Image (cartoon, grey):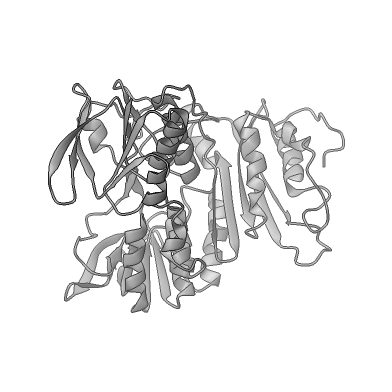
Amino acid sequence: MRILIVGGVAAGMSAATRAKRHNPQAEVVVFERGDYISYGACGLPYVIGGEVESFGDLIARTPERIRSEGIRVRLRHEVSGVDASDQSVTVQEAGGRARREPYDRLLLATGVSPVRPDWATPGVAGVHVLRDIPDGQALEASVKSARRAIIVGGGYIGLELAEALRARGLSVVLVERGLDVAGRILDPEYQRRVRQELERHGVDVRCGVEVQALTASHGRVTGVQTSAGLLRGDVVMVAVGVRPNVALARSAGVKLGHTGAIRVNTKQETSTEHIYAAGDNSESVQRVTRRKVHVPLGLTANRMGRVAGVNMAGGAAHFPGIVGSGIFKTFGLGVARTGLSQHEADALKLDAVSVDVESTDHAGYYADAAPIWVRLTAERGTGRLLGAQILGHPGSVKRIDVIAALLHSRGKVHDLAEVDLAYAPPFSSVWDVLLVAAGQASRAARLPRTDTTAP
C-alpha cells in the first residue's frame, strides 16, 4: 500500500506515524513544501516574547528522526495537482522539476493560510502574519529594530502578541474593527475584562476601527490609515483570521462544506474515493449542536491525523468531534471557553440562559487568592449544559476542562453540581466556583433541585 500525505505538520505527521505503526509494510511518503515538520506553531508568540528561548525549541521531531521510523519525508516539495481518476499527484521539487507520484491512499493535510486583506500589500517590509516558523523569524527580525507596533485583529494571535511585543519594549496599538476584542471567543461582558487587562498593561486598544491602507516609505511600513485616522508604526502584525487551504481538494473534485473547509466523515474520508483530509483544512462536528464547524486548533488537527492514519492503513478509527474548547493568556489574565457562548446560543435560536459567578480561585483566606469569573450557559427546561467561559489567573482557568468533559458526553448542569471535585485551601474553596455556578444555573434553567446540599 502506498500512502501519500500532503503537508507535514500536526495532522500530516500524526497521520504518517500512526499509519506506519498500524501497517509497517505500507510505504508512507510525506510532501512538505517548507523546511519544517512536527513543530509547535502555538508557541510562536512565546518565542517573540522571550518566554521560549528559540524557534528551535518548538521542533518536536526532526526529518531525520521521522525517516528513521521508515517514513519518507520530502521537504521543499509542493504538490500542485491531484488526479483522482488516475490516483496520482503532481509534485514540484525545489529545483522546479515536476513529477507524477501514484497513490493508493492520499491525505490532504494542507492546513490554513492567514487572511491578508487587500490593504496588506505584499512586498512592504515590516508587515507580518504569524503562521509558521519562517513567519516568526521574519517578525523577530523586524522587532529587533522597531519601537512601535500595530496589531490588526483582536483574536487569539493578536491578544497573545500584544503581550509578547510589550515584553520586548515596544509601544503597541491593537486595532479591532469589531465592537471589542475577543469578539468571536467570549460574550461582551467578558470581552470588556480582556480589554481592560490589555489597557492596564499599556496596550492602546482601538475598537470599532477599520484599517484602510498601509503607509510606507522606501519600501518599509510607516503606519496604517484607519477609519479613525493615521496610526504610526514600525511593525504591522496582521491577525484577522485564517482560511482553509482547499485548492488541491477542489482540483480532485472533493466537496467542501458550508464553512468553506473540506467536508469529511468521522473516518476523515472525503467525498472522493481514496482521498482523506485532516487538520485545519477540514470541518469537524460540534458535539453540542451536532453541526459542522471549522475550528482550526492543534489538538483537533493531531487527533484527526491519527484517525486518518489508522484508516488509510487499513484499520478502523473515528473522530468523535469537538466541543470548541480554547484557552490563552494575555498578561496576567487567563481566558478559557468551551461549548457555546450565550451570543452563539442565541444566534442558533436555542432557549439558553447564562449565569455569572465571581469568586476567588482558591480559599479567600489563603495567600495569593485571585479573582475568578465563571459564566455557565445552559438550555432552559432541559438543563443541558451548553458552554462556559472562565477568566482569572492563568493557572486557574484550566477548570474549563471539567466543563469540556461534561459537554463531550452531553451532560447537564446538575451533573456538574454533583461532581466530586478535589478541595484544599491552596486550590479552591470548599464549594468551588464551578459548583456554585452549577447550582445557580440549575435554578436559572428552572430545574428541580436534585441535590439539596448544592449551593
The answer to whether residue 354 shows anywhere in this view is no
Q: Name the spot of residue 339 as percent of width and height, x first.
A: 56, 38
Q: Name the spot of residue 417 as percent of width and height, x first.
A: 76, 37
Q: Is residue 335 left or right of residue 180?
A: right
Residue 136's place in the image compared with 60, above or below, is: below
- Front residue (pair 382, 135): 135
Residue 178's place in the image compared with 319, above or below, is: below
Look at the image and tell me in which quarter the C terminus lies: top right
Residue 223's place in the image compared with 44, above or below, is: below
The answer to whether residue 122 shows anywhere in this view is yes
Q: Name the spot of residue 120 as percent of width and height, x first.
A: 24, 60
Q: Is residue 290 left or right of residue 214?
A: right
In this view, the residue farthest toward the right is: 453
Q: Is residue 164 left or right of residue 382?
A: left
In this view, the residue farthest toward the left is: 97
Look at the image and tell me in which quarter the N terminus lies: top left
- Total label count? 0
Q: Name the spot of residue 288 as percent of width and height, x first.
A: 55, 30
Instruction: Please name the residue shown 36% across and 50% down the image.
Output: 241
Q: Quadrant of residue 350?
A: top right
Q: Is residue 419 left or right of residue 392?
A: right
Instruction: Please name the residue shown 26% across and 32% down the image.
Output: 249
- Front residue (pair 248, 117): 248
- Front residue (pair 290, 8): 8
Residue 116's place in the image compared with 324, above or below, is: below
